[in-house]
Image (spheres, rainbow, N blue to C red):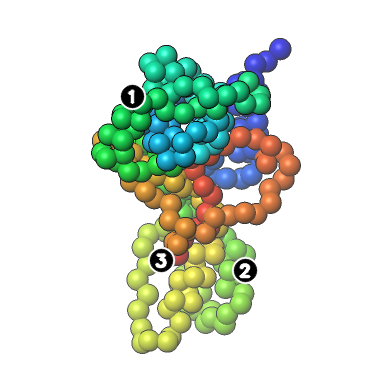
Amino acid sequence: MADSSSATSRDDLLAAILSEEAYRPVEPQSLAETGIPISMIESLLSKRLLLVGSSTGRKLAEHICLPFRIIEDVFQSLRSRQIIIHTGSAPFNDYTYALTEQGRNQAQVAMSACAYVGPAPVPLMDYILATEAQTIRAESPRRTQLKQAFSEISIDEALFDALGPAINSGAGLFLYGEPGNGKSTLAKRITVCFGQKIWIPHVVIDDGQIIKLFDAALHEPDHTEESSIIRSASYDRRWVKVKRPTV
């Protein structure tokens, strides 16, 4: 009988194939697969408890966007070192946790050094690789796709023929002309030619520094309902799918 991690891996592979996504962040199956040190996870959990007072392990795991099953040992380690204590039982073999006095002091020190509390960060290199996998250079829109993207506006056929090769080059385009001649409209239509959804991490970490990437004011999360097969598969909750930004 296959173990749960093998089944999860198969689901992730199937989801990636059926979704036609160039990239899909796979849910980590171990602490090592998160790519971040355990001390970072402990700090995020402790600082969260410092803010809320007490919480169940599953809610803490949900807050930092990591699977509860892979950080159970972290809770046990923090408890054995008297950083946290059980304050009660919770459903599904879980507990409610709170900081000890020693844990509260450590959390305050950690908060002074870095006030960030939220989803666990993604290694910068993982973000770079994801960006490369989702680059428009990997796409080659066909003429029918270009026609569909520009269907809502009127465009000169000669300009359309010139835009095709330029768009497929994946390089930067410089649109110039008098104000109001349609440059912004063309730029937005060009974006439609490519994949409309990409994955980005909430935050990344580089050389110990946390860098916030997702900004609700700039990024529009994608809430499109997916097929039941894809929706049932897991993904790394440290990432969020957004509509491809247009600058």
Residue topped by disc 3 = 247
Name the residue beneath numbered marker 1: 102
- Secondary element at image label 1: helix
Q: Is residue 161 at all visible to an observer of this figure?
A: no
- Alpha carbon of mark 3 to alpha carbon of mark 2: how far? 21 Å
In this view of the protein, which residue sits in the foreground, 41 or 224?
Answer: 41
Residue 114 in sight from this viewpoint = yes
Dot 3 crowding, Cα within 10 Å, few <14, some 14–19, many 20+: few
Question: Which residue is the extreme one toward the right?
Answer: 228
Compared across the picture, whether 40 is left or right of 141 comes to left
Q: Position of residue 82 (x, y in %)?
A: 39, 18
Between circles 3 and 2, the one closer to the viewer is 3
Q: Mark 2 packing: few (<14 Cα in 10 Å), some, or many (20+)?
A: few
Front residue of 116 and 233 = 116
Please give the name of the residue rendered at 63% of the width and 20% of the height, measured from the top-left corner: 93
Q: Residue at x 26, y 39 (%)?
A: 113
Q: Position of residue 212 (x, y in %)?
A: 37, 48
Mark closer to the chain start, 2 or 1: 1
Q: Quadrant of residue 129?
A: top left
Quarter of the rendering occupied by the N terminus: top right
- In the image, what residue occupies the spot 60% across and 23% down? 89
In the picture, residue 92 is in which quadrant? top right
Q: Residue at x 43, y 23 (%)?
A: 84
Helix, strand or loop at mark 2: helix
Which residue is nearer to you in this view: 54 or 28?
54
Quarter location, residue 179: bottom left
Query: What residue is shown with label 2?
Result: 148
> Which sits earlier in the primary sequence, circle 3 or circle 2?
2
